[in-house]
Image (tube, rainbow, N blue to C red):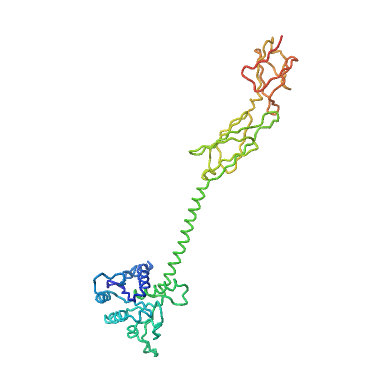
Amino acid sequence: MQQTSKYFAFISFQSSDAREAVRLQHAIERYRLPAVLCKQDSSIPRRIKPLYCYLNDMHAGEELMQELKSRMEQSRYLIVVCSPRAAKSAYINSGIDYFVSLGRRDCIIPIIVDGIPYSNDPETECFPEALKRHFPKHSDPLQDHSILGINIHEAGIGSRRKAYDRAMLMVVARILQLDFDGLLLREQQRRRRKMILSILLALVVFAALFVTWRLSQTVDVQVQVKEATEQNAFLPPCRDIAMCLYLENEQKADTLASLNDIMVFANIPPRYIGREVRMTLSAKDFLSLDTTLVLQKSLTLPIRRDARIYGHVHFHLLDLPQPEKAHIRIVNFPVKADANGLVELDIPIADQQQKYEVIINDRVDTLYMPCGEDDIIMIER
């Protein structure tokens, strides 16, 4: 249908039904027809707009009846909001008569918001007398020219919202002269697609929120240190292990009291889990560790004892002629001095002690570890 009039429809109603009239106007004007219909037929508009609803559109100072007649002349259809109250309205009845006089009898669309059409009961009759006069109902089907009203509360449709939407689509189909069943089917398909898209969008939003939440949640990283060298009960245990975790713009440092404890680096951003990071640790009498590793929630790092602390024995013999000929024994290890009296020995970790018994030519002495740079043993002549 090509829209040649200024308004698609004139909405006529009684003031007590104004809420329903305005609601109907907004529902129809906001409704967007399926795009596929508009593409198939370029004469079908995407929206049915504007409609004329005189409580909304009346200009101040204009004569009411003259204005209504002028607006009706500019409207292609007349929508009559029918109720027992509207049936008694002189304005609505005169408006119907005037619209019919314009030769548009077949362009009247009754919308039933309350009451029963053709009941002839003043308490329930919703069709104005003018409407029944131009569309008389007769017991003889051949003489029956009654008009079928669109009931916004039609029973058997489902919820009140579904009944209202169905009624609104019937009005749209009447105005655009479209097949109602076809329009309803397309609208159902569009709503189904919209619902699917809404679900998919909700899932995407939920996934994005979940990822954001997960990324914002910090994790704790537990680090345990194990001695990687052979343990020796004669040597001091590993104590006060200083550890440092290096992130991009942050360093986390703490001290582990002993090997039996577990270090916890708290509040680590989860993005670092599974990535390479730098970690260092150090402890007295043990070799320092500076390594790059893949960060996990639970880590075990090796620490190795510095074998030279208690294992590298070195001292000088003084006042001993020909020291290279001296018989020297450290614990169970025989050793020789050089011509300058220097004695050196590296003892395996398993045999290391904090002090050693040194026998030199049957003389017994004690050497406390670790050795200093200038440790000497005086040999009396």
Quadrant of the image occupied by residue 283: top right
Residue, far right = 362
| Quarter of the view holding residue 30 | bottom left
| 367 and 20: which is toward the camera | 20
Q: Residue 252 location in percent, x, y?
A: 53, 37
Horizontal side, residue 80 vs residue 330: left or right:
left
Q: Residue at x 33, y 86 (%)?
A: 133
Q: In the visual, does 313 lie left or right of 174?
A: right
Q: Is residue 254 left or right of residue 179?
A: right
Image vertical order of residue 88 relative to residue 337, above or below: below
Name the spot of residue 361 as percent of width and height, x first: 74, 14
Q: Quadrant of the N terminus?
A: bottom left
Question: Front-most of 279 and 219?
Answer: 219
Q: Quadrant of residue 282?
A: top right
Q: Position of residue 362 (x, y in %)?
A: 75, 15
x and y, in percent, of residue 197 in the image: 45, 61
Q: Quadrant of the C terminus?
A: top right
